[in-house]
Image (cartoon, rainbow, N blue to C red):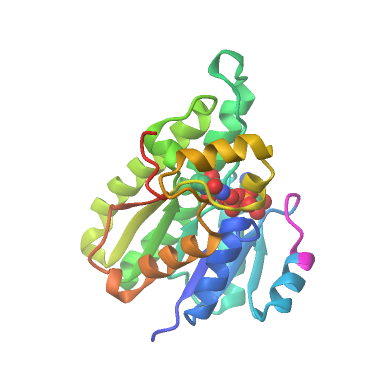
Amino acid sequence: MTQRIAFVTGAMGGIGTAVCQAFAKAGHKVVAAYHPQFDNPDEWTKEMAAVGFTGFVLVSGDVSDIESCKAMVADAEAKAGGPIDILVNNAGITKDRMFAKMEKDQWDAVINTNLTSLFNMTKQVSANMASRGWGRIINISSVNGVKGQAGQTNYSAAKAGVIGFTKALAAELAAKGVTVNAIAPGYIATKMVLAIKPEVLQSIIDSVPMKRLGTPEEMGGACTYLASEVAGFMTGATLNINGGLYYQ
Ligand code: NAD
């Protein structure tokens, strides 16, 4: 297997951690990108070492700021010793509120972090991938970007935008050996979801045809597949990984 350099944003969150572990298991060199205020790299590195994962390249920055993304990628390439082959745009936030009460800053924060971040990060790596004739860009959308969710006009708009971005860039890069795909997870058992009030969480689980949450490892597996050689004919796709939850 060719060892690739994989850059994961939001690497220290629930899904990001599982993606980093899955890529490490697949033999890739993994750049774990974290936010300097939101994440704790020392604690995360210790937790990873405790379960047998070491050797991650760490970089920090803000995906909603293009200059920060430029600096993060330069830092990553210097530390990893080569250009980024695989980019996972995973960092994301929610600021839920019914539209009638949503403030402009809640709209802007979610659009900038969850959608504009794809422009900011992908700009730093896509031309280089195309000129080298190989690349994988994986964008994390959401079931709520596919179906729409009350209280999440900002998040649903951003995550639907992720799918549009994915399809358009896939068409631009299809002939260059670079694939661009999205994953639209349903409800995944991360700290964020497990913190939902038990009765609300139970009603969410009841609405999922499989009657369970997804696991971060299932997201890691999907990313490993999309990053692999054998996924080379898949581009512009959205993998809906949601236990059968579509329009319930
Ligand atoms: P999480 O909160 O555990 O992790 C998100 C990570 O993104 C955090 O480490 C955070 O520090 C980082 N981040 C946030 N803003 C950032 C910024 N401006 N710059 C850099 N990093 C930033 O969330 P998660 O559940 O692991 O979600 C990961 C992705 O999957 C998100 O895009 C989320 O919208 C999406 N998603 C999650 C679920 C779920 O059920 N957990 C479902 C559908 C989609």
> Quarter holding the N terminus?
bottom left
Q: 167 or 248: which is nearer to us?
A: 248
Q: Is residue 229 above or below residue 141?
A: below
Q: Quadrant of residue 126?
A: bottom left
Looking at the image, residue 201 lies above or below residue 188: above
**Residue 241 placed where, x, y %?**
40, 52
Residue placed furthest toward the bottom: 1
Residue 137: percent from left, percent from top: 40, 60
User: Residue 109 location in percent, x, y?
Assistant: 60, 34
Residues 163 and 217: in front is 217
| Horizontal relation, residue 248 to residue 115: left or right | left
The tally of labels here is 0
Residue 25: within the magenta?
Answer: no
Percent position of residue 5, x then y: 49, 74
Instruction: Identify the magenta region.
Output: 37-43
Left or right, 3 with reference to 167: right
User: Can you say whether 89 is above or below 95 in the image?
Assistant: below
Name which residue lies at 64% across and 56% down. 13
**Residue 107 visible to the viewer:** yes
Asked if the stretch drawn in magenta spans residue 41, the answer is yes
Which quadrant holds the C terminus? top left
Q: What residue is rendered at 54% in x and 77% in y?
A: 24
**Quick check: can you spot residue 94?**
no
Residue in view at x 39 percent, y 84 percent: 2
Residue drawn where x is 44% and y is 46% of the image: 141
**Up-down relation of residue 3 to residue 115 (above or below):** below
